[in-house]
Image (spheres, rainbow, N blue to C red):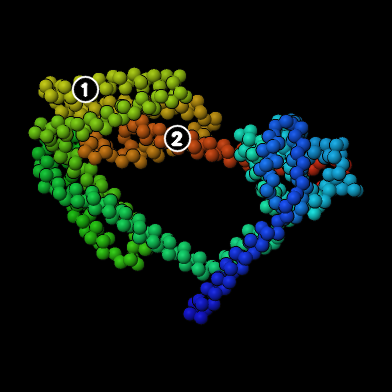
Amino acid sequence: MTRHAARAGAALAGMLIVLISLLLPTVAAQAVGGDDLIVVDTAGRLDVPTLERELADVDFYEPTTVVVFTYSGTANDNLNEKVLEFARAEHPEWISADGQKWADGLFIFALDPDGRHVGTYFGDDRTIPLDDQASIQEATKDDFRAAFWTEGVVVGVKKAASLINRPWYASPAFIGTAVGGGVVGVGTWGGILLVRANRRGKVAAELSRGAEHLTSVTMDLDETELAARTLPTTSSFAQRLEQRFHDFSGRYYSTVEEQQRLQLLTKKERSRSEAPEQAKAFADEAAELDFVDNAIVNAAALLTRAATWEKAWAEQVEPVREDIGAISQLVSDPNSYPLASTQALESFRVSAEAEIERLGADLRSQTISAETALEALERLRGELSHLLREHSRALIEVYAKSNSERASIEAAMEKQRRSVPPRSGSILDTVYGPGQFWNPISFSIGYSAGVSRVESDRSAAASSSFSGGSSTGYGSSGGSFSGSGSSSSF
């Protein structure tokens, strides 16, 4: 783009912004007050004083008579037909002189709270497209499904006021086109700048995270190498840790080199799409090294009963104690109480707490080896994982209504289980890695995520079903009546 063209584009964008800012207040100024409000609450569900107060300041673009009509029907009723029947019998002034349309200047908002229908009807000079009619009805349905009848009517009438006889220059399509067309260069460039700044921010955050872990590894490097050489070859845990330490030095120096490379990236290079992923990979590798070296130091101290063995044991016990303690909060859910799996978890909690205390006492008295104590902790965590698996199946069986819902919750829980990072210093977490053991905290997060997904799917399906049932006909008694309007279920 030439400099002249850029200036011209910027000038055009500025003119459009000013033009739109001038037009929008004009729209509000042209809104006409003093509209008539007629409330006919035959269903007896509305708080009429509140409704009148909330709608007192709602202005339409043209003077409009607003009728709010409620009817107590059934799910099988045609609300369009019922509204027309009522108008013919009780309010013929709502119908045009020829009897074929709704009267000019009229907007009818109809509600059947028992049959669960909502309808909108318009005089010929107030009619709007079916899509806009549907948008008015959809705006009310969250309130109506919660039995907030008055609130839903207020929302519906306000939505109608924003759409009926709306000037062309107030439409979102025009504003979007004007702004999009005139400011496209500015908007696109601004978006690019934001994306690039976001990438640089992510790079900086990951570099900081990785540097913290790598500094810890560097400071403990000599201690880690010494601890690795003193691991007893007879211990199965030591053997698996040695496998993790096999290429530790090589990984460490490679990570240091990667840190230096990333730190030297220019502003332009940090703005590229691949930079945040590279920085994250560096930080993840540094964190992994930090977990491994802490576990090796603890394993050496514990298995050789060095001077710091009790501190090392405490770091093994703490994650297990934390998991067992979280059972109480998990089973306190009233929906979980009647389940046999809930009782099994509570029983395990009591016995596991006693087992942990016994293991500590036996280690101090040297009646068991550190290897045996670690195996006992492994069994406890394995048993807890099994009980949580059984509990998840019981909860899902109660809640889910289909195989697809069961699969959705199970997938969310499995994803959460595998995403929990190892706890620093834990030999078991380092040996097995993420996903081997389940804990109540990740269980709860995963289950909540799964239920939220199912609830969202249910709501979407219900909304699709309801909105898809839109009706525009006036039934067998309507005759040749062709007034603008439609209804749908909620």
Image point (66%, 43%), residue name:
54
- Residue drawn at point x = 13 percent, y = 37 percent: 300
**Dot label at residue 448:** 2
Residue 254 placement: quadrant? bottom left
Element marked by disc 2 = helix
Instruction: Answer left or right for 281 relative to 24.
Output: left
SS of the residue under disc 1? helix
Q: Is residue 91 left or right of residue 243?
A: right
Question: Which one is in front, 142 or 234?
Answer: 142
List x then y, in percent, for residue 280: 32, 53
What percent of the width, then of the height, locates residue 63?
76, 53
Residue 371 lies in what quarter of the image?
Answer: top left
Question: What residue type is disc 1 on?
Answer: Glu
> Mark number for residue 357?
1
Residue beneath the point at 26% across and 52% down: 210
Q: Which one is nearer the viewer's eye here, 113 or 473?
A: 113
Q: Any mark on residue 344, and which?
A: none
- Vertical side of 8 occupied by 387: above or below: above
The Cα–Cα distance between marks 1 and 2, rounded to whole angstroms, is: 32 Å
Position in image of residue 237 (x %, y %): 19, 34
